[in-house]
Image (spheres, rainbow, N blue to C red):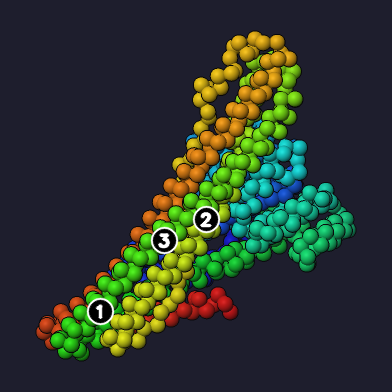
Amino acid sequence: MPSHIPSATSLPDGFRQCLADAEMLECIPAAEMEMLRQRLESNVFNLVVMGEFKRGKSSVINALIGEDVLPVGVVPLTAIATILEYGEVPATQILFQDGTEMQADLRALWDFATEKGNPGNEKSVSEVRVSWPSPWLRSGVRLIDTPGIGSVYRHNSAITYGLLPRADAVLLVLSVDQPIGQVEYDFLKQVQDYAGRIFFLLNKADLLTATDLAESQAFTSQVIAEAMDGPVTLYPFSARLALEGHKNRSADQLTQSGFPDFTEALKLFLAEDKGNALITSLARGLLRLLSQTRFNTELTLSSLAVPVDELRRKVKAFENRRDEMTQEGRDFGILLKAEVKHLVDHDVAADVENFRARLSGEIETQITSHFASARHLSSRELDESLRQYALQVVRTGWDHFRREENEKLEASFHRICARFSGKIHTTVDELYRFSSDLFAIPFDAVAADSDWGIQSGFYYKFWEVPGSIRLMTTSFLHALPKFLGDRLILKDASKYARELADTQAGRVRYDFAQRLDKSMRVFEKSMCEQLTVTSTHIESAVEKGLELAAASSVVADDEAKRLNKRHEILAVLVKRVESLVQSVHT
């Protein structure tokens, strides 16, 4: 197996096998099993590649993938965030800021994702996604290539800083030919506030002698240690040699590049740190289902030994308790709606209004500054330049706000869901405990994690203020003497920009409100279904006992044997899953 391919780990594979074995048991709710499988398969881990311009970030990704996927060059090149995710067939998708998208081939990266092909992001690209059949990406890892910080293109730095909240881990690329500077030092202070893990990479090691490389490594390590308040591991290598080694299938070139030291550390991190938290969470969810299913099986078996009249009395008592719990579930739903409404009416509304006010205040200064630099243009050209500049400033501002607000609301909504999910789980456990006491069957509740978030997909579309609002800018105004008309054009452009910012405020607020409402309804439905499924399965287990009590002894004996066999299978499966969870912490 080539060294750049992550080896399979026993933990995820072991859980997949347990999940598959559990799915073979018809007694376990299919919807719950499907939810666990979807969480396993759709798990996404954002590995963001960052650093100052011309450090070789794109080259590092190409070396990881083993192919010339991303454009590289001798000038600051990457202009738009490019996301690499797994796909059986290579494909490229261009996402635009107005919400539209287009499919393209890999060559389109040069036209849409680079500063040369898309200067200043004049094509209004939001991000570019590349699907690629790389083993690194198969487990849900997404590699995100970012524009360089500190280049002459300020918008590039803004895009990179905006991606920090999305980083689960960061590959920070440095270079031996340019000692770490103040920009990178300051950037480090911000990165550590977001990323759970940072890998420090020292690229272009092939440019130095062994002595000079050791000196560069020592200096860079010392500076990073100061920024991070502690020692760090620095990986020196040559991405260029590593890529050549992959292309030539040369183990010697790969070893010479120094790349395997880094990839082995990354492989270990992705196998353990990245995967273990997810597997532990999913395993607890599966254990919870198995525990409940085993209880239901024991309930049916125990019903065989209870007199029918007594069994019916116990069923009636259970039904009364079930109805009480169902009402509690409805009460939870009312409280859930109230909390989400408060989130919309207070947090979202306040954040949108605060940003609108701040943006409106900044627009005046920016429009005036642009006016000064473009005043040499004719009145008509000046008017158009100011209008386009206002569009760019407002659009960029709201796009940045939406990304940051989405991160904030995602966390807030997750906390709400976790709290209410915990309440529903407690209610479900109480119903099982009540049944446990009623039928004298042991039951051990298993805690499970909640993994709910805001539903994906924006309804928001950027909307330009109709021209009818800009009545002042007419042919007559363009015909005025320039010293007089220019000032009126500036005043009108500032008014237009503020109105544009106000319009987007309402649309963004409405979009977040709609998405939160949709997410809340999906979550509420799932929670109600959990209560319904729980009571239904317990009822079915007891009704099965009543049915068998009325059946012949031969039928009852055969069913008892089948249930005992199922119980044995469940017991073995529980031990296997418990062993997986234990292995994570040893």
Q: Which image quadrant: the N terminus?
A: bottom right
Count neighbours of disc 2 (C-alpha within 10 A) and say few if under 14, some if 14 to 19, many if 20 or more.
Answer: some
Report the side of 586 relative to 414 (left or right): right
Label 1 belongs to which residue? Answer: 318
Front tag of 3 and 1? 3
Residue bearing the label numbered 2? 410
- Amino acid type, callout 1: Phe
Kind of element beneath mark 2: helix
Say whether disc 3 or disc 2 marks the residue closer to the N-terminus.
3
Q: Is residue 217 visible?
A: no
Disc marking residue 336: 3
As helix, strand or loop, the secondary structure at mark 1 comes to helix
Viewer can see residue 505: yes
Disc 1 and disc 2: Cα gap in Å? 38 Å
- Sequence-earlier tag: 3 or 1: 1
Q: In the rendered image of this protein, does residue 547 appear above or below residue 62?
A: below
Q: Earlier in the sequence, mark 1 or mark 2?
A: 1
Residue 93, how many percent across, how many down? 52, 40
Residue at image location 38% in from the left, 56% down from the top: 522
- Amino acid type of the residue that numbered disc 3 sits on in the rendered structure: Leu
Q: CA distance from mark 3 to mark 2?
A: 16 Å
The residue closer to the viewer here, 240 or 496, is 496
> Which residue sits at x=58%, y=14%?
474
Query: Quadrant of residue 502 in the image?
Result: top right
